[in-house]
Image (spheres, coloured by chain):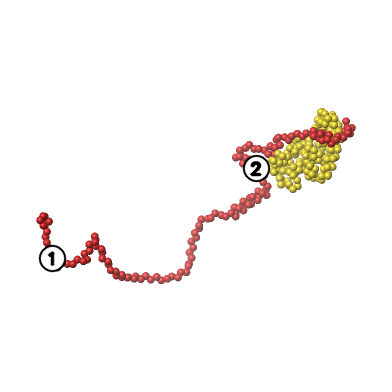
Chain colours: A red, B yellow
Amino acid sequence: MEPFDHDELSDSDLDQLLRQWNAPAPPAHLRTNLFPRSTLPWWRKIWTISVPLPVACGLAMVFFLAAWFWIRPSAPEPAHVVVKTVQVPVIQERVVTKVVTKYVYRSVPAEPAASGFNVGGLRPVAELRPRIIRSGDAKD
Amino acid sequence: MRIETAFDQYHRAVFDFAYRLTRSTDVAEDVTQECFLALMRAPDRFDPARGTLKTYLFSIARNLVLKHYRDTRAEEVDLDQVSSAADPTAALEISSAVGDAVAQLPHLQQEALILFEYEGFALEEIAQVLETEVGTVKSRLHRARASLKRRLAPFRNVGGIHGAV
């Protein structure tokens, strides 16, 4: 049967026919092929994951690291004492040592009497008349 | 947009487009995978100023299908398959009959028809994917539909439209 034996389809008929052509769904493993989900623990992942790096980028990183180690400010070194003997002109002054004795006369103030008794106003007596008093006489 | 998000959004359409052009699930799978791998390898090649991500992905898919055609051109010539589309008795299913009829169209018409009828592309988007003018797309669509109207006319009363197979 040749197609030209029939009339042409109308637009609506063609649209209906076209809608009947079904395509299969994409396979489920398509996603896992592109985005695999690893079940490895992180400590094993770090030994298996690789990062593709262009050679130029790798060389640039090595260069910058080397430059950084070269240029970086070094840690302060311990103080290094250098002893040098230099001759310095000094104007020497002559120092003369002389002993000077100075006498200072000062009046010595009288020492205050103990317990308020002052003997400064006592005078020697003109006549001494001793008087004996018996301590055991009850009448006197 | 993340590549995984783009994959979730467009991989079905890309696979559908590749399948309808090649009629092979294996090839469609490879094309879809290569399409998103190309996006993953060089995401900077996508320029939003030149079109949407959807049209960009379909452009990649189209180029991959063309490459597949070039690589397997000798194997693709199957005269038995070509002649079977015109015979409604040989087409047990309307679906495969329509697929056969579309497969007989010139490749440029196939692309335009599939993008318009099955992927829901606007004429401007098709023109972007096919890297041609909108007028050319209209012309290809018109010729494709006219050709299909003749080729599928025997199926008018066989099934789908007025009855079951």
User: Against B160, is A71 above or below?
Assistant: below
> Is residue B78 in view from this perspective?
no
| Secondary structure of the residue carrying numbered label 2 | loop
The kind of residue on which mark 1 rests is: Leu
Which badge, 2 or 1, comes first in the chain's sequence?
Answer: 2
| Secondary structure of the residue carrying numbered label 1 | loop
Which residue was labeled with disc 2? A50
Picture quadrant of residue B17:
top right
Q: State yes or no: discs 2 and 1 in contact (Cβ < 8 Å).
A: no
Q: Residues within 10 Å of mark 1 (few under 14, many from 20)?
A: few
Question: How far across and how far down the image is residue B36, in percent?
Answer: 72, 41
- Residue located at (34% from left, 70% from top): A99
Which residue was labeled with disc 1? A128
The kind of residue on which mark 2 rests is: Ser
Residue A59 placement, left or right of A134? right
User: Against A79, is A7 above or below?
Assistant: above
> Is residue A102 in view from this perspective?
yes
Q: Residues within 10 Å of mark 2 (few under 14, many from 20)?
A: few
- Which of B100/B80 is in front? B100
Picture quadrant of residue A109:
bottom left
- Residue located at (59% from left, 52% from top): A69
- Residue located at (76% from left, 35% from top): B25
Residue B121 placement, left or right of A102? right
Q: Are marks 2 and 1 on the same chain?
A: yes
Residue B97 placement, left or right of A92? right
User: Against B99, is A122 above or below?
Assistant: below
- Residue located at (78% from left, 37% from top): B118
Question: How far across and how far down the image is residue A75, in percent?
Answer: 54, 54
